[in-house]
Structure formats: C-alpha cells, structure tokens
Image (tube, helix red, strand yellow):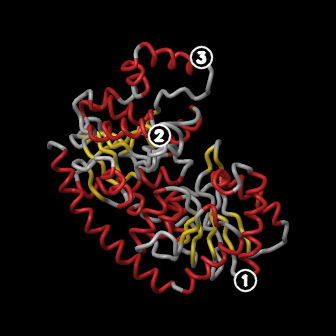
C-alpha cells in the first residue's frame, strides 16, 4: 500500500475476518470506493480478540491496497492493561480515547475521511457502544470527517438517558449512511436528521469468488443452505446453548423429513468467542444420522467464497445477517432468523414487510422454520423479482452516495 497516495481512507472499528460479515463489509466498501475514487488505499484498524488473530489476518490479506492495524483495546478483562485503561478513562478520558486508536493516529492527517464500519456497532446489542463513540470523538477532534457507514443504529429506547446522549452524539458526527429505512426512521424519531442518508449494506457489493477445484465443496442439486449460530441461544432459549443445540437438531431433522432436500450447514462466524462451525458440529453430532445429504461446510472459506457457495444453494435460511445478505445479493430465496432491527429493516426494504420470510426468535420451531422455507421455495419467482428490483435500486443508489461523499470530503 502506498502511504503517499492522495486517496487514503481509514476503515475503523470493524471486527476480525473470522466474522465473514465483517470481512464482507470491508470487501464491499473497498470495492465501492475503488469505483468512486482513483487508486485509493486503505488503513483498516479493527478490534481483535488476540494478537494471533490480528497477525493471521494481516498476513493472509489478499488485497494489497489494505493495510491492517490493531486497536489497543485490552484483550482480557481484569488484567493489568484492562485496569490501566479503566483508571486512565476516569482521570484522563480524552487520553484514554486516543490510546484506543493510537495506531491509527499517524494516518489521520493524510486520510480523506474515516469510515466507522461494522454494521451494528452503534446499538445496545453488545453493551454500550463506547468504543465507537470514542472513535468519533478522536476523529472529530482532529478535524477529519467521521462517517458511520452502512450501519444499523439503535434503538437505545430501553435506556432513555443514554438515548438522549446518543441523539446529541449522532448529531455531531459528519454523516450517517444507514443501511435500511428502519434506522433512518428511528434516527428521525430522536431528532437526528440533517446528517443522515440511506444506502444499502456495503456487503451487497462484495463479489462472490468461486473456490478453486481442489477446494470446491460438492453442492447437491436442490440444496437448502442452513446457517445457525450460538448467538441465537440468547434470543431463543434464554442463553441455554445445550437446549439451542437440541432445538437446532430438531430443526435440521424436520427440514429433511418434510422437504427431502439436501442440507448444507454453513458457518459464517468462526471467532473464538462465537463459533458457528463448532456449534454446527454439535448439531451434526446430535443429528446422529448417517445421512450423505447433510453436510457441514468447513470453516476455511473466506467471505467471498462463502457467498459463492450460498449462491449455489436453492435457498438459504440464516441467523447471521451477512449470511442472509449473501443470499439476497445472490438473488436466491432467503429466510432470516431475526433478532434485531437490522434483519427486520433489510427484509422490510426488500419485500415491503418484516414477517413473510422472517422468523422472530419467539416463533422459532422446527415447524415454523419448515413453513417459512417451503413458502420461500414456493414463491421463488416473486422473491427473485423483489431482489432484482432492490439490487437495481442499490446500484443506482451508489451514484447518490458518491455525490454525498463528495460534499463531505474535500479533494
């Protein structure tokens, strides 16, 4: 990567590529900006669980225009670094914010803008989004544009005082490009309007990459892709993972019994703290059936390869949002196991409703899952028509996004 390049962009706040959704956001964003600007280069500063994970991602990066950095967030709670940061945040809050992103700071003066990427960071799904409000403050304090990019934001309504704080904070950022109208409407309801624009999730623009022949999985005709995650246990079985494994096994069994179609279990996040592949291995163990038409996809495929694999299925039913986006952007019927604003918002923007091809956690069962899959298969022509319309609108929207960015970024 050439550091002297005039079109340098910082992509900050994302998670590791072990989360294929995080990788898809980066790939889609880079693709878009390469279409907009001549020979851009990128510094990506992300939050990793450990240094080994960071080093592996840095060394395996396929795009020479991307340089990876690691934030200095403490990697273990209650260790020495964790306590040092807590104390510093209390006595010197501005310095503590700078410390989190100190690896990024030398690049900020050269950058055209900093994009806060990550999809749903500005929400309460993972606790208070302090890491990301700190990022905004650091960048704004250096006089550079900070752009919340392709995100779902909020809701914060279950914490009214914090919602007031976030309303003021979000008004202060340079721009918010929301990935679904639900976010635009929520922001409007808390008074955040003037800096908000609509886009689609940048992962829609990531190109699928066919695995090489020696790696390519055998995808049987008529395959149903199924992505289930350990994260869903928090919404379906009150966090009881063993119960969620048993329920997932019954879902798999019911799909096979009712549809007689092959099933490909597809992991989309393989992070140490939330590993779809390990979870789906447990489901396969409890399935305990010598069934050649049920396969578990290895964890080795990157985001673009996984998108290609999903595109070869007749349908995908998925818990991870970016597994559903891989399905939507590949124009195949997609059923969403939804637990947040983002999945409901994206479904609403594509189909005009939030329930037809979507399962709320309260309604997840083997029977309801099969019903949604069978409905989506039956209505494949309607779904493909809706997806074609949405993707055409998304392509046209890129022109508007480019115009908005040029108002923000001084060239």
Q: Work out whether mark 2 precedes mark 3 in sequence or the reverse, and give the earlier one.
A: 3
Tag 1 secondary structure: loop
Res 291 → quadrant: bottom right
Answer above or below: position of 301 versus 171: below
Q: Secondary structure at mark 2?
A: loop
Residue depicted at 22% across the width and 30% down the height: 143
N-terminal of the two: label 3 or label 1? 3
Give the class, few, some or many, for how many residues have Cα within 10 Å of label 1's Cα (few <14, many ≥20): few
Q: Is residue 353 above or below residue 377?
A: above
Specify the label residue 313 is tagged with. none
Name the residue nearer the viewer: 6 or 214: 6
Residue 287, horizontal then vertical, whole percent:
81, 66
> Could you tell which of marks 2 and 1 lies nearer the N-terminus?
2
Residue drawn at point x = 42 percent, y = 59 percent:
203
Q: Is residue 1 visible?
A: no
Q: CA distance from mark 2 to mark 3?
A: 31 Å
Q: Does the image show residue 305?
A: yes
Is 186 on the left-hand or right-hand side of 281? left
Determine whether, in the image, residue 356 is placed left or right of residue 148. right
Residue assigned mark 2: 159
Residue highlighted by disc 1? 260
Answer with the quarter of the image where residue 350 lies: bottom left
Who's the residue at 36% across and 73% down the image?
A: 390
From the image, tell me which residue sits under label 3: 80
**Number of marks drawn:** 3
Disc 2 versus disc 3: nearer the observer: 2
């Amino acid at each position: 990567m050439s550091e002297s390049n005039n079109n340098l962009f910082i992509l900050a706040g994302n998670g590791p590529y072990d989360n294929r959704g995080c990788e898809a956001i980066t790939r889609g964003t880079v693709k878009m900006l390469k279409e907009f600007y001549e020979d851009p280069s990128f510094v990506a500063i992300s939050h990793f669980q450990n240094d080994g994970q960071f080093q592996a991602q840095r060394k395996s990066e396929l795009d020479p225009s991307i340089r990876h950095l690691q934030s200095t967030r403490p990697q273990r709670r209650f260790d020495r670094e964790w306590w040092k940061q807590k104390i510093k945040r209390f006595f010197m809050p501005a310095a503590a914010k700078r410390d989190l992103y100190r690896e990024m700071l030398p690049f900020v003066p050269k950058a055209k803008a900093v994009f806060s990427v990550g999809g749903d960071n500005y929400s309460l799904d993972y606790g208070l989004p302090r890491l990301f409000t700190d990022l905004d403050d650091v960048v704004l304090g250096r006089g550079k544009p900070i752009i919340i990019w392709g995100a779902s934001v909020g809701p914060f309504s279950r914490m009214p005082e914090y919602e007031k704080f976030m309303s003021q904070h979000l008004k202060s950022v340079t721009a918010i490009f929301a990935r679904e109208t639900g976010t635009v409407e929520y922001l409007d309801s808390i008074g955040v309007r003037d800096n908000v624009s609509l886009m689609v999730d940048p992962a829609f623009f990531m190109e699928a990459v066919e695995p090489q022949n020696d790696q390519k999985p055998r995808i049987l005709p008529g395959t149903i892709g199924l992505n289930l995650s350990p994260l869903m246990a928090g919404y379906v079985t009150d966090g009881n993972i063993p119960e969620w494994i048993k329920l997932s096994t019954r879902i798999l069994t019911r799909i096979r019994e009712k549809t007689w179609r092959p099933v490909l279990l597809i992991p989309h996040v393989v992070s140490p703290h939330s590993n779809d592949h390990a979870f789906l291995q447990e489901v396969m163990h409890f399935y305990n059936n010598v069934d050649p038409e049920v396969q578990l996809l290895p964890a080795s495929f990157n985001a673009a390869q996984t998108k290609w694999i999903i595109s070869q299925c007749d349908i995908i039913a998925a818990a991870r949002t970016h597994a559903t986006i891989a399905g939507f952007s590949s124009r195949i019927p997609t059923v969403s196991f939804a637990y947040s604003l983002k999945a409901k918002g994206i479904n609403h923007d594509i189909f005009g409703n939030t329930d037809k091809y979507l399962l709320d956690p309260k309604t997840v069962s083997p029977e309801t899952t099969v019903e949604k899959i069978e409905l989506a298969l039956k209505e494949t022509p309607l779904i493909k028509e809706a997806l074609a319309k949405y993707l055409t609108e998304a392509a046209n929207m890129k022109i508007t996004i480019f115009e908005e960015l040029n108002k923000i970024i001084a060239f």
